[in-house]
Amino acid sequence: MAAPLSIQLEFGGGAELLFDGIRKHQVTLPSQPEPWDIRSLLAWIKENLLKERPELFVQGDTVRPGILVLINEADWELMGELDYQLQDQDNVVFISTLHGG
Amino acid sequence: MPAPVLCQSCGAGRAALRRPKTGQALCRECFVAAFEAEVHGTIVAARLFQPGETVAVGASGGKDSTVLAHLLRLLNQRHGYGLRLLLLSVDEGIAGYRDDSLDAVRRNRGRLGLPLHVVSYRELYGWSMDRIARHVGPKNNCTFCGVFRRQALDRGAALLGADKIATGHNADDVAETVLMNFLRGDVGRLRRCAGILTGSEGALPRCKPLKHAYEKEIVLYAYFQGLDYFSTECVYAPNAYRGHARTLLKDLEAIRPSAVADLVHSGERLAVREDVRMPTQGTCQRCGYLSSQPLCKACVLLEGLNRGLPRLGIGKPSRMQKVLTDAEKPEVGFREDSQQASRAIRTVDF
């Protein structure tokens, strides 16, 4: 059983518009049988935080192509992407590259 | 928890990103240094600027132009390009979008210490984009806006005495445009859209110093450097064809990150068969702007708006050119033609 996790989520580059314009969210993920990873975090965000047009944020079980993910200030591509196991006090940033130039 | 990946350049720092073009993992400092050096390399290799030139940087307040203005100012100082840099913004008149993004440009002007000039559609054409959209309906807004913006930038830059315009188009933008022109069979544009420096004959030359920079890297560079940019999608953009090309490109990039650079390369290397007739560049009979037709696209679109036939400039150029150049003839012919045109327009709509 994984203990509850307290993590910070940040949305930027236009992604915050799908979350009522709020950039920083301090959230507590409840305890669950499996460890929390980015895959289950995305499902949780979709269920609990996302306010509108979910298709602009998630696609299948991952983020929509064009949204960058940083885990503790590092590109998630270096951290195992969806399989990264979240730790208490982690910081996850989602930046959309899909808006304007 | 996986061990942190180390930077493949300095071997000491914790890697902050994987570069899409090369797959290389770099720390924040090495990435920033490499990114700046590469843009400098692009500028030098393509001889984009000459000492003493005045360069108008097209500034929308968005990520690309914000990074471009920051980089040009930095590289101009670091490498002694000898350029006089100006920020040039176009106010299309889109409430809730451009007014907010111009605020971002104004904040950056302070930070960069560069002069800013704003030209507006209302002032240049007598029509704001919001008013155009109310007339035209939900489709084709980006056609009007794109044509008018291109000319507005030229006119603004000429007004400021600039020698050249620099725009923030990145590798993803160029790849999208290659794809779009290919899908539309627009051979004339396909041949020139991947060029890094264009329009040196007659019009003000334009260049794209970020042409080889991936969107991902531009966004991360802005993030790591704490640059302030505006990122709301334009209210009219969701209906544009470009959006579909963009989605396709992003899906391809997720499978194979080099797809973006490869498409840019394809656009550069593509050769058009000798027997393909290319449009010949002339000047617009009405305003004198560069045009391959008797009237330039902006004049045709504007004429359509002013006559209450907003769809006049949409679609086949031959038809609208005929309607308009006939209109320069006596009144009777003009009335017949415009009636024909409005009938034709209705049939397109339904």
Image (cartoon, coloured by chain):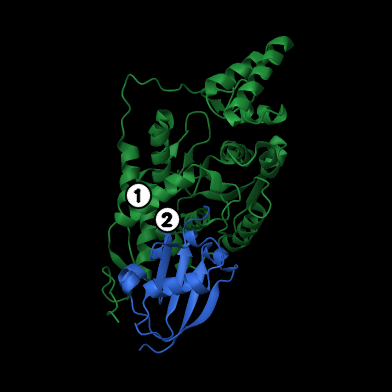
Chain colours: A blue, B green
**Answer yes or no: do the residues labelled 2 and 1 have beta carbons within 8 Å?**
yes
Q: Secondary structure at mark 2?
A: helix
According to the picture, the residue beneath numbered tag 1 turns out to be B260
Relative image position of residue B97 (x, y in whole percent): 63, 54
In the rendered view, tell whether residue B109 sits above or below residue A82: above
- Asked whether residue B59 is in view, the answer is yes
Q: Residues within 10 Å of mark 2 (few under 14, many from 20)?
A: many
Kind of residue at badge 2: Glu
Asked whether B67 or B214 is in front, the reply is B214
What residue is rendered at 48% in x and 79% in y? A8
Task: Give the mark nearest the N terminus, 2 or 1.
Answer: 2
Subunit bearing disc 2: B
Q: Quadrant of the C terminus of chain B?
A: top right
Q: Are the residues flagged by discs 2 and 1 from a single subunit?
A: yes
Q: Quadrant of residue A30?
A: bottom left
Q: Which mark is residue A70?
A: none
Relative image position of residue B186 (x, y in whole percent): 42, 30
B299 on left or right of A10: right
What residue is rendered at 68% in x and 46% in y? B93
Relative image position of residue B130 (x, y in whole percent): 69, 44
Subunit bearing disc 1: B
In the rendered view, tell whether residue B136 sits above or below residue B320: below
Q: Which mark is residue B215?
A: 2
